[in-house]
Image: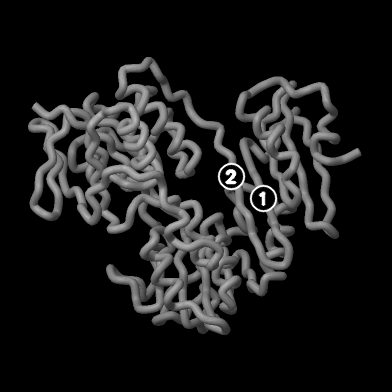
Amino acid sequence: MATETVVIGGGTAGARVAHRLVTAGVPVTVLGEETHAPYNRVLLADVLAGRYGPEVISLPGVPVRRGVRAVSIDRERRLVHCADGTATPYDRLVLATGSNPVLPPLRGLGGELPDGVHPFRTLDDCAALSAAVRPGLHAVVVGGGLLGVSAARALAARGARVVLAQQGEYLMERHIDPAASLLLRTHLEALGVEVHTECRVRGLRGTAVELADGFVLDSDLVVLACGVRPRVGLAVDAGLDVRTGIVVDDRLRTSDPSIHAIGDCAEHDGRVYGLAGPALDQADVLAAVLTGQTARYTGTRALTRLTLSGQGTFDLAAFGETSPLPGDDVVRLADATRGAYRKVVVRGDRLVGGILLGDLTTVGELARTWEGDEPLPSTPLLHLLGGS
């Protein structure tokens, strides 16, 4: 009978839980589809920008069978079948399969991406983009969320002439408000990025981007940064409970108690986070569970951070509920000259959300207060935000 824990996925969540288990003396096999050692996906834009080399973003060493793709799970025999013909037995199985980039339904975009059209999700994607980009190259980034903004600034840092096409009303609309987005847009434009919002892309003609109004953006390179979706195919085929993600309980167990799921592919209490912070929290809790401790995962209060370099450094942090409800108090400070913006939402004596741009020296205390769901300190909020 198998006694080893098998982890499918060598990304942030999979590498973290494997590292914790190896440290505790638990035998682990990690099946990693990518040929690279595990790495920090959050820093891919910094690699593309040339700020870091690929080796800098490597995660602590764990035993990984690289380039091995799991294709099916035999729950009755507790076997993971792989594309190379091998079958790996497990006692406990951890699904850390992450997420796939969303490829929008565009004309000219079939099963295979045309030459010059790239997703931006893996180190291989990063390497392909890095090899293609050169000063003066015309690039179009489709999608103005966190990933698209990161890709656009990285390409601009490499000297490309970048157009960022965002279908929504403003950039990073999932995380920040229109006032903060305007400052973000101003900073990107200072880096040389041409930003178009409320700009729907209809199709591709090779690397030329056709907009809904018929206008065509000529480019040499297209980056599709239209979000991600949980990678749940293995779980679906194995008959596990899947909604948006693979449904797990407070012990990160799926509908099969011998199989767990963590990270971007997991759905806990109706929520799929898709962020590194929750993935690490889930991995830590699961490692504790698998080593016999009485740990429970109760959710993560996740903070989103983005740093843009160029003409000065632009830091952004957003957390919690940034749109107030009736009865909430809002404290807001804005300084367009310095490119600074601070906004917090207060409900009763609790901080429920905030957006901070510019100098983030105040983010630590505010984030700790929010993450701990603690009563606000007696220090006036205006002072915490850097006001007088």
- Seen in the picture, residue 112 relative to 330 is either above or below; the reply is below
Q: Which residue is mark 1?
A: 316
Q: Amino acid at mark 1?
A: Leu
Of the image marks 2 and 1, the number of the one nearer the N terminus: 2
- Seen in the picture, residue 228 relative to 312 is either above or below; the reply is above
Tell me the number on the disc at residue 121. none
Q: Point out residue 166 in the picture as x, y percentages from the top left corner.
A: 57, 64
Left/right of residue 326 with respect to residue 252 in the rendered view: right
* Number of marks present in the image shown: 2
Badge 1: residue crowd in 10 Å (few <14, some 14–19, many ≥20)? many
Q: Residue at x 23, y 56 (%)?
A: 67
Q: Point out residue 268 in the picture as x, y percentages from the top left corner.
A: 41, 31
Whole-number angstrom distance, CA of label 2 to CA of label 1: 8 Å
- Seen in the picture, residue 386 relative to 91 is either above or below; the reply is below
Q: Residue at x 65, y 30 (%)?
A: 368
Q: Look at the numbered disc 1 and give the secondary structure of its residue.
A: strand
Tell me the number on the disc at residue 304. 2
Q: Quadrant of the C terminus?
A: top right
Q: Point out residue 322 in the picture as x, y percentages from the top left corner.
A: 67, 40
- Seen in the picture, residue 350 relative to 203 is either above or below; the reply is above
Q: Look at the numbered disc 2 and give the secondary structure of its residue.
A: strand
Q: How is the image coloured?
A: one colour
